[in-house]
Amino acid sequence: MKTVAILYGGKSGEHEVSLRSGGSVFSHLNRDLYNPILIAVDHNGIWYYQQNPGFEEDQKTLTLERKENFIVSVIPGLGFYCNGKKLEIDIVFPVLHGTFGEDGTLQGLLEIAGITYAGTGVLGSAVGMDKSVAKQVWIQSGLPVVPFITVRAGLGLNNEDTFKQVVEKFGFPLFVKPANAGSSVGVTKVNSFDELKSGVKNGFRYDTKLLIEPAIEGREIECSVIGNMKPVSFLPGEVISDNFYDYDSKYIHPENVNLSVPAKLTDNEISKIKETAEKAFLTSEAEGFARVDFFIENKTGKILLNEINTLPGFTEISMFAKLCDVSGLSYKDMLTKIIKLAEERYKRRNKLVFKKEATSVHEQ
């Protein structure tokens, strides 16, 4: 039986979401195939081995126990250690959403440690996390995206002239988004010039680069994708909400939001969304699994890419698992499939040569 380390918590604004995601993965992992252990990351970025895994009162949210003699360290090429002893881990399943978990930094650490891990690698994670870069990659690939303008801190581009240009180009309402954040953390919907300035100020609390986009009047569609070099997309779903689908709507008051799974779409729309999701997945270098988000514009019927989430929510109310399930892939089987894809990628990468091979007796 293989040991799977579920890595959860983290330093990002999505810490609490990760506690729920980790709980779901821990509860649904196939115990006939895998032995789960838990490693929690606190708000300061310190890793702790959870000797006594536990849940909050809701029985869905993992607790986080901090004990100095259970701090986990990572040694390049050797793996994870705790209290002077190596943790025998076969696969890491990270559910660290957002910064320092979903942006390629964690993936780089796991690569250096020589550990097999689930999900997208370093490049794909970095691209997927940066909404501006992802959209530029998709535009280069001929894929349709929601229009945007990038604003950077400290470069003189977040002044009133820039704001006026944005309003002239897009009008109101607008969305201001940190380029590198998830679960709608730091996102503001604005309807006036003053709100725009305030939204930009708030966005810069979370990132040094922001996207300003027009608010698309249309349907919000999401599509789960699983695979490595040959990804497979699942039936898309729809988020139905009277208000902006923000952090509170997703995790604090989900009762105010309806998830239509699967979405009521034409065969042509379903085919187009699935095809585009798979192309977006491949061109952004995603691997393992991801959720690709779209808008269908009311006026034109255009299908527009919004973003890709390479570590989407894994809670019991998250869309990713619901879309797999409605397409015939249960939560438990979905986790098993993702782990097997991680092993497949690790074996493939392990066959690569990373140093110059000797070509003569003098080089041997």
Image: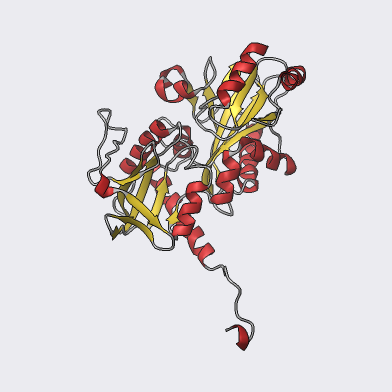
Residue 187 sits above or below residue 267 on the image: above
Corner quadrant of residue 17: top left
Residue 192 at least partly seen: no
Residue at 67% x, 20% y: name it.
298
Corner quadrant of residue 268: top right
Q: Whole-percent x and y of residue 263? A: 54, 28
Residue 271 sits above or below residue 106 on the image: above
Asked whether 287 or 162 is in front, the reply is 162
Classify residue 266 as left or right of residue 317. Answer: right
Residue at 47% x, 24% y: name it.
247
Quarter of the picture containing the C terminus is bottom right
Colour treatment of the image: secondary structure
Quarter of the picture containing the N terminus is bottom left
Asked whether 286 or 218 is in front, the reply is 286
Q: Whole-percent x and y of residue 219? A: 60, 23
Q: Whole-percent x and y of residue 197? A: 64, 17
Q: Whole-percent x and y of residue 123? A: 59, 50
